[in-house]
Amino acid sequence: MYKYSKISRYKIKKILKLFCEDLPATKSAKILELNRKTIDRYYNIFREQILKHSKMQVARLGGEFEIDESYFGAHRVRGKRGRGAAGKVPVFGILKRDGNVHVTIVKDCSKEALMPIIKGQILEESTIYTDGWKAYDGLIYNGYEHYRIFHSHNEFARGKNHVNGIESFWSFAKRRLAKFNGIASHKFLLHLKESEVRFNYRNNNFFDIMLDVIFKHL
């Protein structure tokens, strides 16, 4: 990143600082008096490093988890309802209670698509909380303790039985991504993973975290 850069290491850190403050590239370019394309290039580098960092954090863990799926992208098409609505990208999320969330773009939200991800990230005998989606049928037979909350019955929480944590992430991510007024499909994963990492480190100094993430992997 530095070898072929025409701007100083100090300036790059200033770009990173504004990136961490979640400022759009246009505003950062004005503040730093740099070309918008330069800011876009570094923002993209930062997001690619975040993606690498996110992949390195995935591990098979035990404990209590919330799992859920959500859809990102275009508004629902009239007449198309429920999971699999046209024009949207399905995303599957696993949140470890008192831990981090990890999200994966999936082809669909079938049991065949989701179960390998669950088994790849959650150890047997762990406790999993879900909604009533049929893809989660059989979690008990795969060695998990499974509790459900049925939103279709206007049920949202019974003590520890809820998926409020993962739903909080969906809300956070969709609010962030909405401000871009559309994201190119080939860059959606980068923005999604940026939202994931921002959420996971929301109680930390994000700039300090990103200094480590960016410069450790370059």
Image: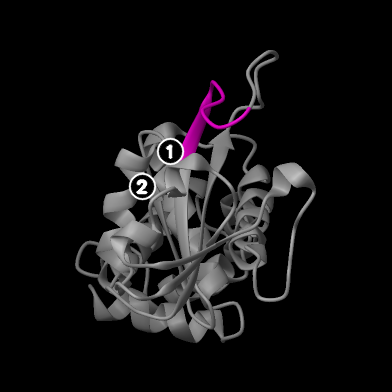
Nearer to us in this view, 56 or 125: 125
Above or below, 134 relative to 116: above
Identified at 43% across, 58% down, the residue is: 193
Query: Closer to the N terminus: mark 1 or mark 2?
Result: 1
Disc 1 secondary structure class = loop
- Callout 1–callout 2 Cβ contact below 8 Å: yes
Q: Position of residue 172 (x, y in %)?
A: 65, 59
Give the quarter of the image for residue 206. Answer: bottom right
Give the farthest residue toward the right: 154
> Residue under circle 2?
114
- Which part of the image, by quadrant, shows the N terminus? bottom left
Identified at 58% across, 34% down, the residue is: 182
Q: Position of residue 132 (x, y in %)?
A: 58, 47
- Which part of the image, by quadrant, shows the C terminus? bottom left
Give the quarter of the image for residue 82. Answer: top right
Please say whether residue 15 is visible from this viewpoint: no
Disc 2 secondary structure class = helix
Q: Is residue 114 left or right of residue 84?
A: left
Q: Which residues are magenta?
A: 82-90
> Residue under circle 1?
109
Identified at 59% across, 52% down, the residue is: 131
Q: In the image, what residue type sits under mark 1?
A: Cys
Q: Is residue 120 left or right of residue 23?
A: left
Above or below, 161 relative to 138: below
Residue 19 forms part of the magenta stretch? no
Identified at 39% across, 63% down, the residue is: 46
Q: In the image, what residue type sits under mark 2?
A: Leu
